[in-house]
Image: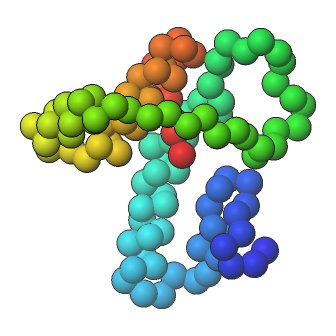
């Protein structure tokens, strides 16, 4: 694999194959081990209701569904984020996790 390519687990192949010899490499390896341990029992995929069966071979094709939030809603969301000490990205990601959890009826949802 070349630099920047990914193995089946989604980790950069160069990270998995390089010897650990610096503080940042050790920190990266510690972080990698931590998350592998935390996600060990995570569901591999969501059980989402679909109108057709999943294909036998998964691919990465997808679609873009643009949405636009009006100025008033955007401002209210920004104010909510400021009051909670988080970014708009964090708030929207949390909301998306709730939507996926409810649709799949699964308590644990892995995003990313």
Residue at the limit of the structure toward the front, as seen here: 71
Instruction: In this rendered view, identify the residue nearer to me: 92 or 13.
Output: 92
Instruction: Where is residue 98? Give x, y as percent.
Output: 41, 22
Please state if 92 lies on the left or on the right of 5 as rendered.
left
Residue lying at 65% horizontally and 56% vertically, measured from the top left:
10
Colour scheme: rainbow
The N terminus: image quadrant:
bottom right
Instruction: Where is residue 50? Give x, y as percent.
Output: 73, 15
Quadrant in the rendering for residue 94: top left
Residue 19 seen: yes
Instruction: In this rendered view, identify the residue nearer to me: 46 or 88.
Output: 88
Residue lying at 27% horizontally and 29% vertically, measured from the top left:
73
Residue at the limit of the structure toward the left, as seen here: 83
Instruction: Where is residue 66? Give x, y as percent.
Output: 55, 37
Quadrant in the rendering for residue 81: top left
Instruction: In this rendered view, identify the residue nearer to me: 98 or 25.
Output: 98
Residue at the limit of the structure toward the bottom, as seen here: 21
Instruction: In this rendered view, identify the residue nearer to me: 63 or 4.
Output: 63
Please state if 99 lies on the left or on the right of 92 as rendered.
right
Quadrant in the rendering for residue 72: top left
Residue 24, compared with residue 61, is above or below; it is below
Residue 94 seen: no
């Amino acid at each position: 694999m070349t630099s920047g390519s990914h193995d089946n687990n989604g980790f950069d192949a160069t990270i998995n194959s390089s010897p650990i010899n610096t503080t940042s490499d050790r920190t990266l390896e510690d972080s990698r081990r931590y998350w592998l341990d935390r996600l060990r029992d995570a569901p591999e995929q969501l059980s989402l209701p679909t109108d057709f069966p999943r294909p036998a071979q998964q691919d990465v094709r997808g679609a873009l569904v643009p949405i636009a939030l009006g100025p008033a809603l955007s401002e209210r969301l920004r104010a909510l984020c400021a009051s909670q000490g988080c970014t708009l990205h964090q708030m929207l990601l949390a909301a998306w996790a709730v939507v996926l959890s409810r649709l799949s009826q699964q308590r644990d949802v892995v995003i990313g």
